[in-house]
Image (cartoon, rainbow, N blue to C red):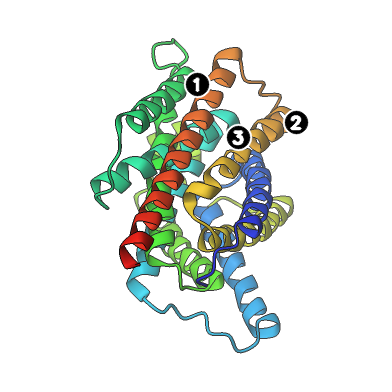
Amino acid sequence: MSEDRPALAASLMVSALCMLALQDSLVKLASADVSLWQFQTLRALCNLTMLFVLSRFIWGNASVWPKRFWTVALRSGFLVGAMLSFFGAIPFLSLSEVAAGLYVFPLFVAVLSAVILGERVGPRRIAAVVAGFAGTLLILKPASASFQWVSLVPVLAGLFYAATVLTTRKLCREESPATLALGVSVAFVTVGALGLATMETLKPAELAASWPYLFVGWNPLALEIAALIVVCSMLNLTANISLAKAYQSAESSWLAPFDYSYLIFATFWGVVMWGDVPDLLSFTGMAMIAGSGCYVAWRERKESRLREADLNRALR
C-alpha cells in the first residue's frame, strides 16, 4: 500500500472507533465475571480463528506472513502494552475517563517524533502539548479526594499507542492489515497465557480479593460471558484491520481530528450503559485535549507540505 486515500482512511477510522467504543463498553460489562488475562487470551484466540477463516475462504492464497518480522513484532508489543493498560483501568474508571487518558496519544506522537525521529517541534506545538495535558488533568482531577492512581494508567496506554501509531506509519506501511492483526492476536495470546499461568501459579489471595480483575487467573465461564467475548472479538478484529488500513492510507496528521470521535462514542456508550455523565470540567478537558491534538496535527501537516514543496523546488 503506497498511495494515500484520505477519504477512505477517515471513513475507516470513524467506523472502527465506533466499534471499539462499543467493544470497550462490553468489556466493562464483563469485567466482574472474567479476569483481564482470561478475557484477552480468549478474545485473541477468537481473533486468530476468524483470521484463519478469512485467510482460508475469503482472501484466498494471500500470505499473511510479515515482510519484516521485527517491525510487526515491535508494533504488536506496543499495542499489547496500550491495550493492557487501557483495559486494566476500565473496571475502575468511567469510560470517558479512560478514553481521555488514552487520547493524549497524539501529543505523545508529537513528543516522540521530536525525541526519536528528530523532527522540529516549535513553541506553538509545545504550548498545544501543555494544553492537552492540562485538559487531561481537568478530567483526572489529581488534587481531588476522588482521585485514584489507577487514573494514570490510561495515560500510559496513550504513550504505548503513540508508539504504535508511529511504528505503523514509519515501519509497517507495506504490511497487510491482516498481517498486522495477526501479529497483535498472537502477541495477546502469548501475553494473556503468561498472565493466566502466573496468576494460577502464584495465586496472590490478598491482591485477588481487592483487585480480582487483575490478579485472578481463570474464572468459571458462563455462556453469556463467552458470547460477549465472541462479540468483542468480532468488533475488535474488524476495527483493528480498519485502523491499520486507515493509517496505511493517509498521514497520521490528516487522521488525527477524526481519531477524536472515539471520545464522543465512549461518552455516548458510557451514558447509555452506565449512566456516567461527565461533569463540566471533564467536558472542558476533552475539548482541550481534542483541540490541542488537532492543532498539533494541523501544524505537522502544514510543515510536511512545506518540506515537500522545498524538496520539489530543489529537484527542479
Q: Residue furthest front?
A: 316
Q: Is residue 92 above or below residue 26?
A: above
Decide if residue 70 is on the left or right side of residue 21: left
Residue for badge 1: 139
Cα gap from disc 2 to disc 1, whole angstroms: 20 Å
User: Which label number is shown at residue 5?
Assistant: none
Q: SS for tag 2?
A: helix
Which numbered circle lies on residue 263?
Answer: 3
Q: Position of residue 266 (x, y in %)?
A: 64, 36
Q: How many marks?
A: 3
Residue 173 in view of the camera: yes
The three-letter code of the residue at mark 3 reads Leu
Give the mark, 1 or 3, whose residue is nearer the N terminus. Answer: 1
The amino acid pointed to by label 1 is Ile
**From the viewer's perspective, is residue 177 above or below residue 226?**
below
Specify which label sits upstream in the sequence, 2 or 1. 1
Q: Could you tell me residue 187's position as x and y percent?
A: 43, 64
Please rate how many residues cluster around mark 3, counting C-alpha atoms within 10 Å: few if below 14, some from 14 to 19, many from 20.
many
Spatial separation of the CA atoms under disc 2 and disc 3: 14 Å
At 65% across and 34% down in the image, what residue appears?
264
Q: Residues within 10 Å of mark 1 (few under 14, many from 20)?
A: many
- Give SS at disc 1: helix
Residue 53 horizontal side relative to residue 176, left or right = right
The residue that label 2 is drawn on is 272
User: From the viewer's perspective, is residue 197 above or below residue 214?
Assistant: below
The answer to which of 71 and 151 lies nearer the viewer is 71
